[in-house]
């Protein structure tokens, strides 16, 4: 009788495996093992901001190509009330404590680097969420922000920085390729 039970157990196991194989269930694999389709969407460039010059600002600035220009999406926290400027800078480096490593202000050909983005103001809530349209700006190429940095300046002017000297630079971020948000 024992050989009959073993045979029945073997048949039952084979039936289960056959049903699983026909049902699309992959034994020993997960859906992550399957080939993913390549996402060709351009999500733009994003610069995570870090505080400099003793500020506490953090956030992100994203640039996305739109027609003949770009949308600049700004999300910042801990911004002191008052006026501030956003400027793109030549060098993709935010390692210095005063932002000097970001280099000089930069703008696309024919634009003024010091006034590319108009003066902005912060209310008493210390948060900034805004979207700006900037003509001639791109994410990549000679008029693009890829390979550059962005600096947040306190006040009405985009000023030059000197090494190891306090200045009006409050935050800095280096642009990198933005990716789709996945959970």
Image (spheres, grey):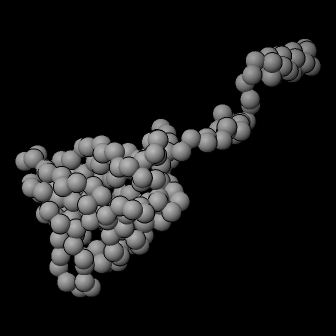
Apparent side of residue 179 relative to residue 106 in the rendered image (left or right): right
Apparent side of residue 164 relative to residue 143 in the rendered image (left or right): left
Residue 138 point in image, percent of width and height: 46, 53
Q: Nearer the viewer, residue 22 or 121?
A: 121
Residue 71 point in image, percent of width and height: 38, 45
Image quadrant in which you'd find residue 112: bottom left
At 38% from the left and 57% from the top, the residue drawn is: 47
At 28% from the left and 48% from the top, the residue drawn is: 75
**Residue 65 to residue 8: above or below:** below
At 41% from the left and 72% from the top, the residue drawn is: 91
**Residue 42 to residue 56: above or below:** above
The residue at the far front in this view is 110
- How many numbered marks appear? 0
Residue 40 point in image, percent of width and height: 61, 42
**Residue 168 to residue 164: above or below:** above
**Residue 41 to residue 135: above or below:** above
Residue 32 point in image, percent of width and height: 64, 38
- Judge whether residue 78 can be spotted in this image: no
At 46% from the left and 45% from the top, the residue drawn is: 68
Q: Nearer the viewer, residue 48 or 21?
A: 48
- Judge whether residue 22 can be spotted in this image: yes
Apparent side of residue 103 relative to residue 18 in the rendered image (left or right): left
Q: Nearer the viewer, residue 57 or 74?
A: 74
In the rendered image, which quarter contains the N terminus? top right
Image quadrant in which you'd find residue 19: top right
């Amino acid at each position: 009788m024992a050989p009959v039970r073993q045979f029945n157990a073997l048949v039952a196991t084979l039936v289960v495996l056959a049903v699983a194989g026909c049902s699309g269930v992959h034994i020993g694999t997960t859906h992550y093992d399957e080939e993913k389709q390549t996402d060709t969407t351009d999500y733009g460039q994003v610069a995570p901001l870090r505080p400099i010059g003793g500020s506490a600002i953090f956030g992100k600035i994203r640039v996305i190509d739109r027609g003949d220009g770009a949308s600049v999406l700004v999300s910042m926290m801990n911004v002191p009330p008052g006026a501030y400027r956003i400027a793109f800078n030549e060098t993709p480096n935010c390692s210095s404590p005063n932002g000097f490593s970001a280099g000089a202000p930069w703008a696309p050909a024919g634009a003024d680097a010091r006034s590319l983005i108009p003066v902005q103001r912060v209310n008493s809530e210390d948060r900034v969420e805004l979207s700006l349209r900037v003509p001639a700006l791109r994410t990549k190429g000679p008029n693009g922000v890829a390979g550059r940095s962005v600096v947040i300046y306190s006040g009405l002017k985009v000023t030059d920085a000197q090494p190891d000297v306090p200045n009006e630079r409050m935050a800095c971020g280096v642009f990198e390729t933005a990716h789709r948000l996945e959970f």
